[in-house]
Amino acid sequence: MVPLDFKSLHTIPDSHEWNKSTVVDDPNTIEPIPVVDLNDPNAVSLIRHSCEKWGVILIINHGVPMDIVKELELQTYELFSLPSETKARALRSEGSLFGYGLHRVAPFFPKLLWSEGFTMSGSPMEHAAKLWPHQPDQLTNFCAVMEEYQKEMKKLSGKLMELMLESLGLTLEDVEWFKPKNGTDRAQSMLQLNSYPTCPDPDRAMGLAPHTDSSILTILHQSISGGLQIHEDGIGWIPVHSVPGSLVVNVGDFLHILSNGQYKSPYHRAIVNNTHHRISVAFFYVPPSDVKNGPLKKLIDDDHPPLYTPVTWAEYLQKKSYLDVKPKQAY
């Protein structure tokens, strides 16, 4: 399905109309989501606290050059500013994860989303060439920026994986498919560009429907206008405010499983607004599709039995898609 031409709409069609929900943004009511400086000697303990309580961390001094992040934003806006008929040339084929189209969670909800996306793994050349067939310089620049950003994200993912495991009293060697000895691992990754155009009535629309990520971890860059929210039981929806120079790290379902439920995989969503065209870029760090992952052995004992059955990423996706539920309910 091709996303709507949102620029041409002055009202929300019934197909995209959602019910309004309550958002809690009172510092006297909720503890703020921590901003963790990765150079802080206490970073590991701060990561543990945030992963246990929220499942979300804001990180600074992460090592990703800000000029690369700025170029990423520019190229993302460049893509989504193209005419609808141009973007449709790169529409995902049926059954494919890559190219232009609706967000992957969209089919699981009765109402459509006020957003559009473009997904890649590695070079986006195959689909990007359909967007700029007669602009070789723009095509080259777009692909170069996306590939460079993915390289930075892979490095950062390895660093975060090490810190998160350390916060659980573990090392990379406790994850069988991770091979730090030769500097590589078998993890997979995807990059998702998201566009949330301005909306005439944002209280009745949804940018990204509530869900958890099926990754190990997700690293998100969101534009300064923000829009990401997490759900806290007994409280409601809580904004994850954008902090200049920071990146948002979400615990994914598979880190929730590996940690035997110690770390939350947060239920989250993205809202829209009527003043700013918001973009975000999500890097999904996922396990090898054919390796069974369960709670790590060192986290299991008589007092802490395994909460989850080992499962491959491919099996998990199939089951989660079928049930459309949170990870703790999936098996």
Image (cartoon, grey):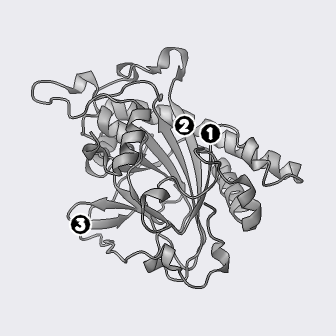
Q: Which of pointers 2 and 3 indicates the residue nearer the eye? A: 2
Helix or strand or loop: what does disc 2 sit on?
Answer: strand
How far across and down, in percent of the image, does residue 237 sit? 32, 66
Neighbour tally class for label 2: few under 14, some 14-19, many 20 plus, Cα within 10 Å:
many
Q: Which mark is residue 189?
A: 2
Left or right placement of residue 152 versus residue 44 in this view: right
How far apart in space, not on screen, are marks 1 and 2 (Cα)? 6 Å
Q: Nearer the viewer, residue 274 or 20?
A: 20
Looking at the image, residue 44 sits to the left or right of residue 222; the answer is: left
Q: Residue type at mark 3?
A: Ile
Residue 235 is marked as: 3
Residue 10 seen from this side? yes
Q: Quarter holding the N terminus?
A: bottom right
- In the image, residue 149 sits, relative to residue 223, either above or below, namely above
Contact? badges 1 and 2 (CB < 8 Å): yes
Q: Earlier in the sequence, mark 2 or mark 3?
A: 2
Disc 3 secondary structure class: loop
Q: State the image coordinates of residue 11 (x, y, percent, origin top left).
A: 56, 84
| Residue at position x 87%, y 48% in the image | 136
For badge 1, the amino acid type reads Ser
Q: Alpha-carbon distance for marks 2 and 3?
A: 33 Å
